[in-house]
Image (tube, helix red, strand yellow):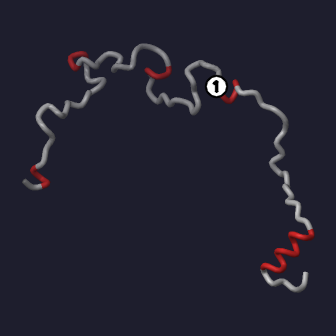
Amino acid sequence: MKLHQLKPAKGATHKEKRIGRGDGSGHGGTSTKGTKGGQSRAGYKRKMAHEGGQMPIQRRVPKRGFNNIHRVEYKVLNLGQIEQLAEKYAITEF
């Protein structure tokens, strides 16, 4: 047996569902999308974080305080820590 001779077992594969190809196909009419609403229309794209009418999580969660995006955070160093660093890296002059 060679690679080009391989095929799935009998009954393992199904025919592709052809949507919108007439009533005789069994998937005609509304093309399995139901009637009315955004999802049944052409060009519909689901919005990011859309929860189907439920209040979105970014609006449910309380927002507290103020976060300054330009904040500068400082680290505290004691003179002893500076001396240890100077000894570790052999720095003689500051």
Q: Residue furthest top?
A: 35
Query: What residue would you read off at disc 1?
Result: 56
Secondary structure beneath label 1 = loop
Nearer the observer, 3 or 77 = 77
Give the x, y percent position of residue 61. 71, 27
Nearer the observer, 22 or 45 = 45
Q: Which quadrant would the C terminus be assigned to in this image?
A: bottom right
Above/below status of 91 relative to 82: below
Q: Amino acid at mark 1?
A: Pro
Q: In the image, what residue occupies the spot 55% across and 21% down?
A: 52
Q: Residues within 10 Å of mark 1 (few under 14, many from 20)?
A: few
Asked where in the image residue 55 lies, by quadrant, the reply is top right
Nearer the observer, 57 or 94 = 94
Asked where in the image residue 41 lies, by quadrant, the reply is top left
Give the x, y percent position of residue 3. 14, 54
Give the x, y percent position of residue 45. 50, 31
Above/below status of 68 relative to 11: below
